[in-house]
Amino acid sequence: MLKRVQVVGVALAVSIGIVPAGAWSQSTVGVLYTVIVPAGDFGSANFTRQLVSSLATAKAFCGGLDKSAYRVDCLSERLQVVSDGIPEGTDYDEVRQVLEAASAEMALLARDNRDPDLPRAPASRQGDSSERSTRPLSPVASGAQAEVGERAIAILEQAQTQLLRSAEGSNGRSLQYAQIAQAIDSTKVLLRS
């Protein structure tokens, strides 16, 4: 038995079969491709690499912000974006849930410690206005940044622990969850500076 997972993204689409004339000329910008994962085997090494890459991109995006006051909520927003990219009903449901929970906790932490003197604002990567946050980010008050950073680190460490514990007893899952946990760990450096 095979499970089908549909992922929307920019990729090369390969189709086997007969395509009506003119069908390709009506394509849209986004491309739909299907990843087939055999039932009983854990996930896909390619999808794990994609998740790890997405977490590295999140780190680079938030690290490029001019003001460190926005970093906690930036990481929160980026974790939600990564989580939203994980299809439901797959071997990665638990990863999606862990990332969603960490994102929600960090967003609440930023809102509860918001700097009233700085505006909530969308973020974009320096030099690349095409990559933007999906929502305005809440800045953390300067006097609370060290404590909020430590609490955000604790949230990320809890997410790592949950992933590593849930993978115990499964070699395939253990390796892939360890890679995802390591990518989460690498984002903590932004919160220490």
Image (spheres, grey):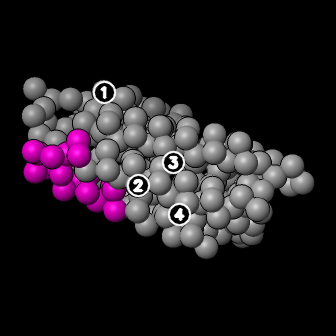
Q: Nearer the viewer, mark 1 or mark 2?
A: 2
How far apart marks 4 and 3 lie (CA) works out to: 10 Å
- Figure quadrant of the N terminus: top left
Q: Nearer the viewer, mark 3 or mark 2?
A: 2
Main SS category, magenta section = helix
Which residue is identified by label 3? 79
Residue 98 shows up from this direction:
yes
First reached walking from the N terminus: tag 3 or tag 2: 3
**Amino acid type, label 4:** Lys
Sequence-earlier tag: 1 or 2: 1
Q: Could you tell me which secondary element the residue under label 4 belongs to?
A: helix
Q: Which residue is mark 1?
A: 89
Q: Residue at x 39, y 49 (%)?
A: 158
Q: Nearer the viewer, mark 1 or mark 3?
A: 3
Relative to 108, 113 lies left or right: right
Drawn side of residue 187 relative to residue 106, left or right: left
CA separation, marks 1 and 3?
Answer: 19 Å
State the separation of the CA atoms marked 3 and 2: 14 Å
On whether residue 172 falls in the magenta region, the answer is yes
Q: Which residue is mark 4?
A: 59
> Image quadrant of residue 99?
top left
Residue bearing mark 2: 157
Residue 108: where, in percent of width, then height? 63, 40
User: Which tag is nearer the camera, tag 4 or tag 1?
Assistant: 4
Instruction: Tell me which label, 4 or 1, sits earlier in the chain.
Output: 4
- Name the amino acid type tagged 1: Gly
- Give the answer, above or below, for where 116 lies relative to 145: above
